[in-house]
Amino acid sequence: GYVWLRSMPPKGRVVAGQVDDTLFGNPNEHALRKVRTRPVELRSVGVVGAQELQGMATRAWAGPQDRRSMGSGGEERQRLKALSDARKAKWPNTLEALRAKKERARQEKAAADEAVRMALDREEDALQAEKRRVAIERANKMIYDATDRVKALHSRLRECDAVTERQRQIELKKRIIAERDEEAKWFQLEQEAIRRFDAEEDAKLEEEAAKKAALAKVREEQLAGRNMERAAEQRVREEETEMMRTLVLENFEAEKRERVHKVERREAEKRELIESNRALLELRAKEAALVEQEEAMISVYKEKKERNVQQRREKKAAMFKAKQEQRQHLIDTQSAQLAAMTSDAEARLDAQMAEVENKAKPAPMPAQGPSRAPTGDGEVIWGESDSGSFCNPGATDDARASQASEARARKEEKRKDDLLIMHMSRQRQIRWKAEKRLQEEADSRHLAESQAALNRELQMEEDAELRAVIDRRKEYDKVLQAQMAQKRERKAAEEREGLVIAEMSRQFNGDDDEIYEQYAQMCLDEYVAAGKELAPAKLYLAKELKKDSILAN
């Protein structure tokens, strides 16, 4: 039996409900018909056979080990799939087969079109080659006809034409004169015959006057008829003579037109030769103009390059001058700063020394004399101030001695203090001088380092500019070398071409007599076939080729 499933079939799996009925038929047609008769909400189901459902359940409930054991038949499935694919590949109505067939047809059509194009290209190449060959042969014929020997031969052939034409004219004139003489002779013979006949008739008439009296009228009629016939014959002869004269004149005019046509044809050939020579001269003039233009361009490029080099030199000089001015300005600025610092330090040291000297000077003595110090018991003690001695008249010698020693001790202490102050001032000055010297040395080192850095920078810039100039010169040398190589190649090509032309000229001069003789013999054969006079051409060829075989022929 079958199991009805409400779910959609799994992805990638074809069930019986999805099989095309038109290919192999549907074994589940009865069940599908029952499904189609169901309501719409129950139609989205799939029909699966019991065996397939059992297999699905087995695979669903099987573990990994069972799946591996079931998958051991993969090789068999692959073999069966390969057999199925091989059988499918032989089917002519599949999409792949149709695509392959269309691709083969497209490739065959492209190959056929390419073959047709190649055939057309070959035909076009052959046609162009034939055209080039014909043009080359025609040009070679024109060039060969333009040589002096061929021109001389053609002039002799034209002389032969003129001699032949003259002979024909003479023969025609002789024939006309002979015909006229023949006509006059026949006319005289006819007149003599007429006179003789008339005499005979007169004699017969005289002799047979009696016999022919009766027939006189008939005879006269016969004579009149005969005279009429003779007159008619005379008119016929005159008409024939006139017709022959007209025919001769027409032939003469035709020959004259033929001569004019030949002259025009020769003039046309001459003009064509002149045009070809003019075209060749124009081509050479154009080539010379191109060479001059190239030389002018080279000279212009050279002048432009020289101007650029001069401008670069001027620019380099200006940059060097600006850098020198900048360096001098920096040196002046640093020197001014150093001088200002030095003057400030010296002023400060002078002020400190003046202050120390002012402090080291002794205090001035009081102008009123010894002071009198009152005591507590009404005694007056005479003594000195801090800077001098004092005495007390009422004191004892020991007191005065102690006071003097105290005054000396105070004075010594003051002197020590002054010495200490002077020593400290001297040490301060020494330290300031050392600091000034160190500062000057540091400033000098800084200035030297700055100058060295500036010099290194300037040197690097000069080196870079020099390298750029060297690179530009190398590029210029490369261009010049390339131009020189091109000139050498052109010169070598011209030399090779000259050698080839010389070799061809040598070979041509070696074979020229034979070619010229063959050409002359061909022209003579043509004139012989036309029945023309060849005496001038034979004499010229015998003299030119130094062969008597021409005269023999």
Image (cartoon, helix red, strand yellow):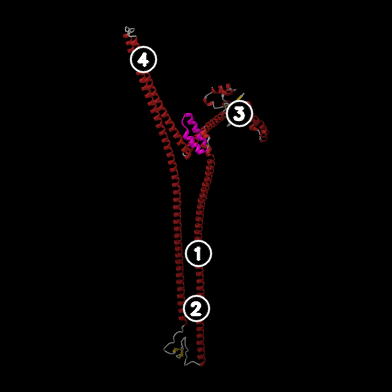
Q: Earlier in the sequence, mark 1 or mark 3?
A: 3
Pointer 4 residue: 197
Q: Earlier in the sequence, mark 1 or mark 2?
A: 2
Quick one: SS at disc 3? Answer: helix
Quick one: SS at disc 4? Answer: helix
Camera-nearest residue between 306 and 341: 306
Compared with 327, 378 (above or below) is below
Name, please, the residue furthest toward the front: 207
Residue at 61% x, 27% y is 90
Label for residue 423?
none
Q: Which residues are magenta?
A: 517-546
**Gap in Å between the C-alphas at discs 2 and 3?**
117 Å
**Gap in Å between the C-alphas at discs 4 and 1?**
149 Å
- Total numbered circles: 4
Question: Callout 3: few (<14), some (14-19), or many (20+) C-alpha neighbours within 10 Å?
Answer: few
Amino acid type, label 1:
Asn
Quick one: SS at disc 1? Answer: helix
Give yes or no for contact between labels 2 and 3 (Cβ–Cβ under 8 Å).
no
Question: Callout 4: few (<14), some (14-19), or many (20+) C-alpha neighbours within 10 Å?
Answer: some
Quick one: SS at disc 2? Answer: helix
Q: Earlier in the sequence, mark 2 or mark 3?
A: 3
Pointer 2 residue: 425
Residue 312 image offset from top left, x and y in percent: 45, 58
